[in-house]
Amino acid sequence: MYERHAVSQIPPMLAASCTPSHRTLESLAEGRGNCGMIYVFGDYELDTTLYELRYAGEPRKMEPRVFNVLAYLIQHRDHVVSREELLDHLWPGLFTSESLLNNCIMEARKAVADNGQVQRVIRTIHGRGYRFIAPMAEPREEHPPRALLCPPKSPWPPCHHPRSGWRPSHP
């Protein structure tokens, strides 16, 4: 069992690719910063910018803590992730039970059509932890489209609205 305290920061596994000024949940929710990656495996995409798991392009419902578990396992797929590592990185300072982590793993497996018997995506290494094992395409960094950053100026003057007080100037 762990004794943990609540924090207002995003889990370190998602914050690692962010600049320090973009690490709060609020800033990410508002779309500030270039912190996102898209991880592709099979017909699934895990988008850490939108906090979204998509199957064949369609978003799948997922609790935030389940999303964080899946994202952490994907980002650390090169090694077996112990239960303690998951707890320390995803819920630092918070008291958590074994059943919370078990439930998150089970829900993450369900979200990617896996289960404890088949283990095609998340493998349990008994007595050691978990490992993401599905074949993956190269992750790609997600940048906001340029059009969202700097919308092009219109070559046309604004429309006249009788209440706006604006009138076109004549040469």
Image (spheres, rainbow, N blue to C red):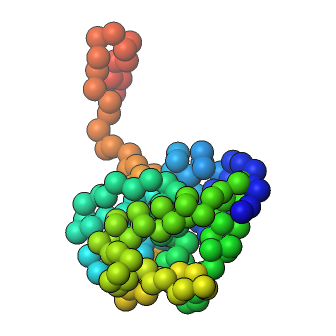
In the image, 95 versus 68, the foreground residue is 95
Give above or below for 80 relative to 148: below
Residue 47 or 42: which is nearer the viewer? Answer: 42
**Residue 54 place in picture, x, y as percent:** 31, 64
Whether residue 45 sits left or right of residue 19 in the image: it is: left
Left or right of residue 10, residue 1 in this image: right
In which image quadrant can residue 61 be found?
Answer: bottom left
Quadrant in which the C terminus is drawn: top left
**Where is residue 154 drawn, in percent x and y?**
33, 43
> Could you tell me which residue is drawn at 33 percent across and 71 percent down?
112
- Residue 30 in view of the camera: yes
Which one is in front, 15 or 94? 94
Query: Compared with residue 85, is residue 103 higher up or lower down, i.e. above or below?
Result: above
x%, y% of residue 143?
Answer: 47, 65
Residue located 38% across and 50% down the image: 152
Please give the count of numbered marks on the rendered protein.
Answer: 0
At horizontal 33% and vertical 23% (from top left) the residue drawn is: 168
Q: In the rendered view of the protein, which quadrant contains the N terminus? A: bottom right
Residue shown at 66%/66% (left/top)?
87
Quadrant housing residue 136: bottom left
Q: Residue furthest top?
A: 163
The quadrant holding residue 89 is bottom right
**Can you see residue 144?**
no
Image x and y of residue 28, in percent:
56, 52
Apparent side of residue 143 relative to residue 81 in the rendered image (left or right) = left
Q: Is residue 105 above or below residue 22?
A: below
